[in-house]
């Protein structure tokens, strides 16, 4: 049975990315939750299963993206 690794996830609204933290791993940064899961899995040995534990801010951002809410504007681009 593969090991299960729980990654605590928060969302940085100023920078527009998710941050994953685990005591045994360096912080992982990604623009999406799937990217975060892939990056975290690539740092783990063997066939470990990554479980993301979202805090309130990350959960709110995920729900906004799922519902097709307003997109963030990025510096240097026109809307």
Image (cartoon, grey):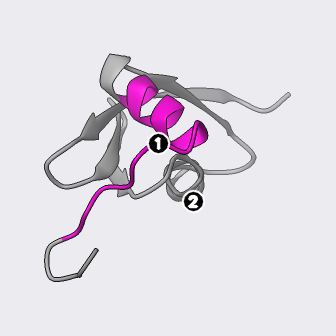
* The residue positioned farthest toward the front in the image shown: 79
Counting from the top left corner in percent of width and height, residue 41 is at: 59, 51
10 lies above or below 76: above
**Residue 34 visible in rendering:** yes
* The residue positioned farthest toward the top in the image shown: 56
Q: Residue at x 40, y 25 (%)?
A: 60
- Chain part drawn in magenta: 58-74
6 or 76, nearer to the observer = 76
Q: Residue at x 15, y 82 (%)?
A: 76
* Alpha carbon separation for disc pair 2 and 1: 30 Å
48 or 62, nearer to the observer = 62
53 lies above or below 42: above
Q: Is residue 53 left or right of residue 18?
A: right
Residue located beneath label 1 in the image = 69
Helix, strand or loop for disc 1 = loop
37 lies above or below 61: below
Q: Residue at x 25, y 63 (%)?
A: 73
Q: Is residue 39 left or right of residue 16?
A: right
22 or 66, nearer to the observer = 66
Q: Please tell me how many numbered marks the rendered image carries.
A: 2
54 or 23, nearer to the observer = 54
Packing grade of label 1 (10 A; few <14, some 14-19, many >=20) is: few
Residue located beneath label 2 in the image = 42
- The answer to whether mark 2 and mark 1 are in CB contact below 8 A is no
Q: Residue at x 47, y 35 (%)?
A: 64
Is residue 21 located in the magenta-colored stretch of the structure?
no
Discs 2/1, front: 1
Counting from the top left corner in percent of width and height, residue 4 is at: 66, 26
């Amino acid at each position: 049975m593969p090991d299960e690794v729980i990654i605590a996830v928060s969302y940085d609204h100023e920078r527009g990315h998710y941050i994953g933290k685990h005591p045994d791993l360096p912080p992982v940064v990604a623009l999406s939750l799937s990217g975060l899961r892939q990056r975290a899995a690539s740092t783990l040995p063997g066939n470990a299963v990554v479980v993301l534990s979202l805090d309130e801010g990350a959960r709110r951002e995920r729900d906004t993206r799922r519902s097709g809410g307003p997109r963030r504007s990025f510096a240097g681009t026109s809307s």
